[in-house]
Amino acid sequence: MSTLHPMLNIAVKAARRAASVINRAARDLEGVTVTRKRQNDYVTEVDHAAEAAIIEALKKAYPGHAILAEESGAAGESEYQWIIDPLDGTTNFIHGFPQYAISIALRHRGVLEQAVVFDPGRNELFTATRGRGAFLNDRRIRVSKRAKLAESLIGTGFPFRDLQHLDEYMAAFKVVTRETAGIRRAGAAALDLAYVAAGRLDAFWEIGLSAWDMAAGALLILEAGGLVSDFDGEPHYLDRGNIVCGAPKVFVPLLQVVQQAHRGALRPA
């Protein structure tokens, strides 16, 4: 049983408030208004209401902290910044496909300190505090002990907003399909990362994510004994939007495959 850090405790309360908004809406999906932001990218009034509930709870406790949220953007200046995705997997949610989650992370002076990923449908609460381990519903979790890529189940996300990297992605997809036990694409990156932390997936990679998709899940993986990097093997995934992560012995060969497939294509100009 873990004793929650005070800031993590506030984040959990905020996530549960958002969950009540989401679960209420999930009972009547036909009544949910959907707006298209851009190609294959949707937002609902549920996203906005859940985000507002999270920000209200965080601001009540920490009025001076900065916010970076998917729907409302960046607000405030502080060495503390909350990074929020109120409903990761909106397209799944709209269709009643039960794979979506709330993601909340706290970054202090650029370092991830607190993480919450909450699956409101399954009532699974993934939490981490830097240096104190990762937990699922208060039980300690660790990345898998899998040692071979050939025996591993790998998570991914297809490029869907920006298709310019689709060819490079498909090159990696082809190799990973051939050299692993299987690939899964469930459509909610925050939850995929939490699954890596819990050992349900052995590793994960994706192109073109935003900081709010990755921040909480990345800390969960690190605190569960895993490795996380961008496609250059560097820790700049939140800024670059490209991520490879997993159990240590699976992470290394997966990173090599991804690097070979994307070499030259995704390096900053």
Image (cartoon, helix red, strand yellow):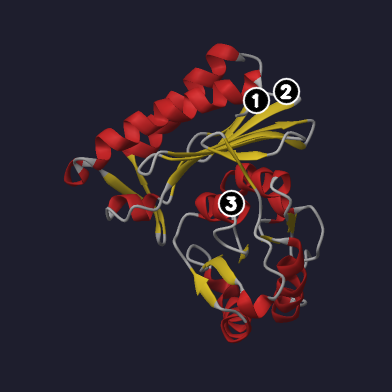
Q: CA distance from mark 2 to mark 3?
A: 32 Å
All told, the count of numbered labels is 3
x and y percentages locating residue 51 in the rendered image: 45, 31
Among the two numbered marks 3 and 1 on one chain, the one whose residue lies closer to the N terminus: 1
* Foreground of the two, 33 or 82: 82
Residues packed near mark 1 inside 10 Å, few (<14), some (14 to 19) or many (20 plus): many
Is 129 positioned to the left or the right of 165 in the image?
Answer: right
Q: CA distance from mark 3 to mark 1?
A: 29 Å
Q: Give the structural element (helix, strand or loop) at label 1.
A: strand
* Foreground of the two, 43 or 95: 95
The residue pinned by badge 2 equals: 78
For badge 1, the amino acid type reads: Ala
For badge 2, the amino acid type reads: Ser
Are the residues tagged 2 and 3 within 8 Å (C-beta)?
A: no
* Foreground of the two, 98 or 83: 98
x and y percentages locating residue 167 in the rendered image: 58, 81
Residues packed near mark 3 inside 10 Å, few (<14), some (14 to 19) or many (20 plus): many
Quadrant of res 29: top left
The residue pinned by badge 3 equals: 198
For badge 3, the amino acid type reads: Ala
Q: Give the structural element (helix, strand or loop) at label 2.
A: loop
The residue pinned by badge 1 equals: 66
Q: Residue at x 60, y 39 (%)?
A: 135
Are the residues tagged 1 and 2 within 8 Å (C-beta)?
A: yes
Among the two numbered marks 2 and 3 on one chain, the one whose residue lies closer to the N terminus: 2
